[in-house]
Image (tube, rainbow, N blue to C red):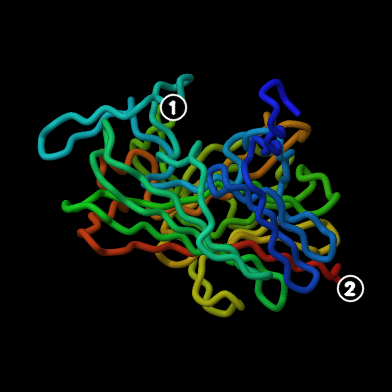
Amino acid sequence: MNATGSEPAEAVPATGTQYEITRGSARAVIGSLGGALRRYTVDGVDLFQTYPDSAIPPSANGVLLAPWPNRVADGRWKLDGQTQQLDITEPSRGHASHGLLRNTGYTVREQVPGAVELEAGIFPQHGYPFHLLHRVRYSLDDDGGLHVHQSLTNQGGAEAPVALGAHPFLRLGDVPTEDLVLTVAASTVLTVDDRLIPTGRQEPAGTADLRAGVRVGGLLLDSAYTDLALDDTGPDGAAHRYVLGAPDGRTVSLWAGPECRYVHVFVTDTFPGQPRAVALEPMTAPANALNSGEGLVWLAPGRTFSARWGIRGELAPAR
């Protein structure tokens, strides 16, 4: 007992309540903090860079991005001619970053063995005077593939500017990530200033051109791509696909629906315990969309905007 004579409350991890879903040999764990994916394995092979439940997601790993992905320059934008000021959540560059739910606890709406649906509210606040509901459903299919469906519903009385994204870091079991080859079939990369705010676009060149595949160990990237190839032959329907391939022919890929017209590729040497780590971030709009309007959806009251993405492994070595 504690000093008040009552039983101590059960400790909750820093990442909140843990929701585990399984199907066949596939297993995923989602934390209520940020509605973030924490672990995803198939046949015991890690396909996601996991992290302890006692730590907040490193480099926003697995976090869901709503009602905007990436950055808003200086946290400022204009609504009906009036300047809106968001909280600065990326102090190193002075921006508002990754939406409004990164530090929010989601609640469960439904859970079955192979799926879980969570939700969290976005309430009117300084810099974003709109009322939205964000829902996410994680599910596993018969082949062990992970499917993620995100939606925003406008619960207020005015049109709201919205976009969706996610921030998963992928891996392929015990293969060093620096030995994987990254392929992204994109014909345009967004140019940025020294604070990573888009300034234009160009055809990718050099190591930024990922169309033919580039070894991760030779990369450090923090770039958004668009004009993405659409593949309608895979098991997940028409989708954009980004692949990390091992020397033995095994792959892990992130797929995203056609509504995710952008992917942010973040290859970093600062992820804890990893010489290189790769985040493939599906997005419906690029950085600074609240100012540029690019990819932004103005969501009418009572309407819902959705996006889907997922992760899939091909784990049989090539013969």
Q: Secondary structure at mark 2?
A: loop
Residue position for label 1:
89
Which of the two marks, 1 or 2, is nearer to us in this view? 1
Name the residue rendered at 72%, 76% in the picture. Answer: 143
Closest to the observer: 253 or 51?
51
Closest to the observer: 220 or 67?
67
* Residue 70 visible in image: yes
Residue lying at the far front of the rendered structure = 5
Which x, y percent locates residue 203? 44, 49
Would you call the spot at circle 1 few (<14 residues within 10 Å), some (14-19), or many (20 or more)?
Answer: some
Which x, y percent locates residue 80? 11, 39
Q: Amino acid at mark 1?
A: Thr
* Residue 294 visible in image: no
Label number found at residue 317: none
Q: Amino acid at mark 2?
A: Arg
Which x, y percent locates residue 243? 65, 59
Name the residue rendered at 43%, 24% in the picture. Answer: 194
Asked if the residues shown at circle 1 and circle 2 are in contact, with their CB atoms under 8 angstroms apart, the answer is no
Closest to the observer: 117 or 69?
117
Residue lying at the far right of the rendered structure = 319
Instruction: Looking at the image, tell me whether mark 1 or mark 2 is earlier in sequence order.
Output: 1
Label number found at residue 319: 2
Name the residue rendered at 26%, 49% in the picture. Answer: 161
Residue 169 as seen in the image, left or right of residue 25: left
Name the residue rendered at 41%, 60% in the picture. Answer: 151
Quarter of the image where the N terminus is located: top right
Q: CA distance from mark 1 to mark 2?
A: 48 Å
Which x, y percent locates residue 105? 52, 43
Residue 131 as seen in the image, left or right of residue 19: left
Quarter of the image where the C terminus is located: bottom right
Closest to the observer: 109 or 217?
109
